[in-house]
Amino acid sequence: MWSQVMENDSTSAFEGFILVGFSDRPHLELILFVVVLTFYLLTLLGNMTIILLSVVDSRLHTPMYFFLANLSFLDMCFTTGSIPQMLYNLRGADKTISYLGCAIQLYFVLALGGVECVLLAVMAYDRYAAVCKPLHYTVIMHPRLCGQLASVAWLSGFGNSLIMAPQTLMLPRCGHRRVDHFLCEMPALIGMACVDTMTLEALAFALAIFIILAPLILILISYGYIAQAVLRIKSAAGRKKAFNTCSSHLIVVSLFYGTIIYMYLQPANTYSQDQGKFLTLFYTIVTPSVNPLIYTLRNKDVKEAMKKILGKGEAKVE
């Protein structure tokens, strides 16, 4: 029996998978194609703008914008790793993805999602240092430390994926090829297994504590200290400035963590595929596209840098 399971799995490895996605709602697929393509283009434009501004404008050569540029690059990689395949499947009747394509997609979705969790915690620490230790900020957040913190974020995410992606892909599927999702995501692939997955789910939960919950706790602690520091500021203008410094990051954290915690910290048997699809759609296309907008609209430095660049462009045209 076990040899038959392995034979079926090897067959599916060659044949790949079928991403069911929203094929049961064909009238919705064309609408989703337009929506997803629009958000994808906005994501690329917005995040490329943030990266460009952080490089060319000397006023943005600070730790905050160094981490923001990392976040923008991350969002571009995250969407590019999943959306093109999604658009291909939404566009026509072919819903297939190769085994290698599924493996690569799963690895990068897991890795980059983990990187973002840790990177948001690093950005919270940066805001803590800026608000609570303003006189020592440049000493604390020196370039070497910033590089080390960014490296920890990237290595943590990819290390977590290096453990979980192979374990998920190696689960016996008894010839099942239909993935009830529009991308190769861990909960959907675990749900296809024809064996008990409790051990793998326990491992996933344990790693999620370090990749998701631990950074979230650090974020909450950082903002606890920030709140205390803000309340001690006597002037209304000072409190407003401190709030504006942190509000953009808080909005991004809320959007990202709200969906991630719901997706990955619940048992597989309570996992609703329809809810999972729409939540994944939200953090795959909406969150990466609104991040640059949130930071641009609520950040004076970024808006001034954009005006400076646009002003130079208009001057050259004249």
Image (cartoon, rainbow, N blue to C red):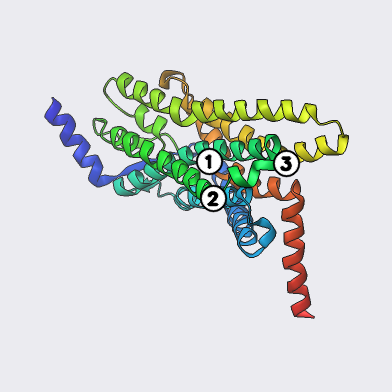
Q: Position of residue 249 (x, y in %)?
A: 66, 39
Residue at image location 64% in from the left, 65% down from the top: 56
Q: Is residue 66 left or right of residue 90?
A: right
Q: Is residue 286 left or right of residue 26?
A: right
Residue at image location 47% in from the left, 27% down from the top: 264
For the residues labelled 2 and 1, say whether their Cβ atoms are less than 8 Å apart.
yes
Q: Specify which label sits upstream in the sequence, 2 or 1.
A: 2
Q: Quadrant of the N terminus?
A: top left
Q: Position of residue 163 (x, y in %)?
A: 32, 35
Q: Is residue 192 left or right of residue 300?
A: left
Q: Position of residue 125 (x, y in %)?
A: 59, 36
Task: Give the label, 2 or 3, closer to the camera.
Answer: 3
Q: Which residue is mark 3?
A: 245
Q: Which residue is mark 1?
A: 119
With respect to residue 221, does 242 lie above or below? below
Query: 109 or 179: nearer the eye?
Result: 109
Q: Quadrant of the C terminus?
A: bottom right
Q: Specify which label sits upstream in the sequence, 2 or 3.
A: 2
Q: Which residue is mark 2?
A: 70
Residue type (three-letter) at the residue carrying disc 1: Leu
Query: 226 or 104: nearer the eye?
Result: 226
Dot 3 falls on a residue whose secondary structure is helix
